[in-house]
Image (cartoon, rainbow, N blue to C red):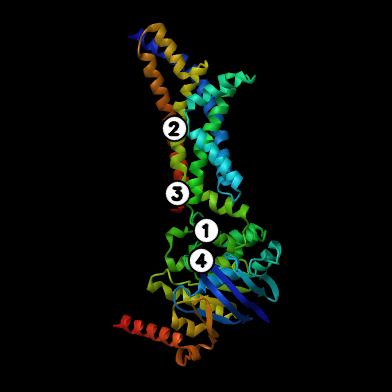
Amino acid sequence: MENYLQYIYDSSIFILKGSILTVQLYFVTIVFSIPLGIILALMKISKYKFLKLSIGFYTWVFRGTPLLLQLFFTYYGLSIFGINLPPFTAAALTFVINYSAYLTEIYRAGIESIDKGQYEAAKALNMNYYQTMKRIILPQVVRRTIPPTCNEAINLVKDTALVVIIGMGDLLRSAKELFSRDFAVTPFIIAAVIYLLMTSVIVFFFKKIEVKYSIYE
Amino acid sequence: MKMIQANNLFKSFGQHTVLNDVSFEVNKGEVIAVIGPSGSGKSTLLRCLNGLEEIDSGIIAIESEHYADKNHGGKDKINLKEKKNIATKLGMVFQHINLFPHKTVLENVIEAPITVLKMKKNDAIPLGEALLEKVGLLDKKDFYPSKISGGQKQRVAIARALGMNPDIMLFDEPTSSLDPELVGEVQKVIADLVKEKMTMMIVTHEMRFAEEVADRIIFMDEGRIIADEKPEKIFYNPEHPRIMSFIENIAMRQLIDKD
């Protein structure tokens, strides 16, 4: 029994070490793709047709093809053109571009769901476009898009497991290595528990923000 | 002093002409009620005055400064910057109120003075509180709009518009979205502004209120002004058959309501 506990402990440490990369990739993706999603959403609703169309094309491609394929493309595909990205860079780039595409559409829908009376009231008070967006529209959009953003944040935790295919060591790969060595399911269970812990933290965090933003309802 | 001069305004949405050669003037301190059947162009007229809609052609001057000057199919001769400057003289209150739901009552009032007029927050707060006092809602200053009644919301919206210190107030059916028992409190706030000699244009369906507060009544029908007269004339001695039938209709409806 004691041996088994020791085994769980050692395995957990090993898998947690693997998860450092998962966490790094996670934060890079979140930090870049949320602001990028907001900016691209604002561009997508702008009156410039070219901007609208190019961003529409971008979200169409990146939401319409597998993330796995996109990862292959940036890591293996680009090397044919002489662009050799280190695995982490390739993964981070792909994840940011892919998640920004989803978030762009979420925020675009959020912006369009705000009543046009809000724009009119702001205009009647002589607020300009920038002031209206920053002070009136976007704060309401952020509140409304917390639940779908939370969904994406949870998906991202699980999607990070895909980096295994470009040879990166992460949480799941560490678990897989232990499995191959020991031929025991315990490492998988430990990995599942770690994923669950991570997603729980994220859900908890988003609940907090939701409560903070919902005081006006 | 002429506060508003509108000459030959035209406006259409697609094939539908909403303003058809509309001209009128508003003097300083005058209160104008704009009445008429639904779809007659009353709201569009107000919205053109404060730039929420663009006229197709015509000239609008606010305090003798040209605010819009356009020929059919041509470009507006007034540039955007001038327009913006002149627009600060107009305050607007909407039928659908449109308070900012994520801001408290006080924040709603001081938002534009701070962001647009660049007022310091410490100066804006006493201004906001004074305006809320004036509409009788100082005790609700830290409430969010979702926590107050429709009538209270509209009073906040009036305070919010006054926060920009406008010379002219435009009211677009300010009581139409309210429950009947809440109409009075909003009308009282507007009546207080009448006493202060604020120049106002009020689009309304409340005939008794229009008669009570207005110096002149503009009657619109199918995009035209068909009468611009004193209330007594419109209500008790109308000449135009359209006005007669409109007034009779309303009188009938009020009689039915009383039963």
The C terminus of chain B lies in which quarter of the figure?
Answer: bottom left
Alpha-carbon span between mark 3 and mark 2 = 21 Å
Alpha-carbon span between mark 2 and mark 1 = 32 Å
Q: Label 2 is placed on what type of residue? A: Ile
Quarter of the image holding residue B166?
Answer: bottom right
Write down the residue under mark 3. A214
Left or right: residue B181 versus residue A163 is left
Residue A172 spot, x, y in % from top left: 44, 18
Q: Residues within 10 Å of mark 1 (few under 14, many from 20)?
A: some
Q: Label 1 is placed on what type of residue? A: Gln
Write down the residue under mark 1. A118
Alpha-carbon span between mark 4 and mark 2 = 41 Å
Left or right: residue A208 versus residue A85 is left
Mark 4 or 2, which is nearer the eye? Answer: 2
Q: Label 4 is placed on what type of residue? A: Val
Residue A209 spot, x, y in % from top left: 47, 42
Write down the residue under mark 2. A154
- Give me the residue at 46% from left, 16% from top: A173
Are callouts 3 and 2 both on one chain? yes
Write down the residue under mark 4. B156
Relative depth, front residue between A142 and B81:
B81
Of the numbered discs 2 and 1, the one sitting upstream in the chain is: 1
Q: Secondary structure at mark 3?
A: helix
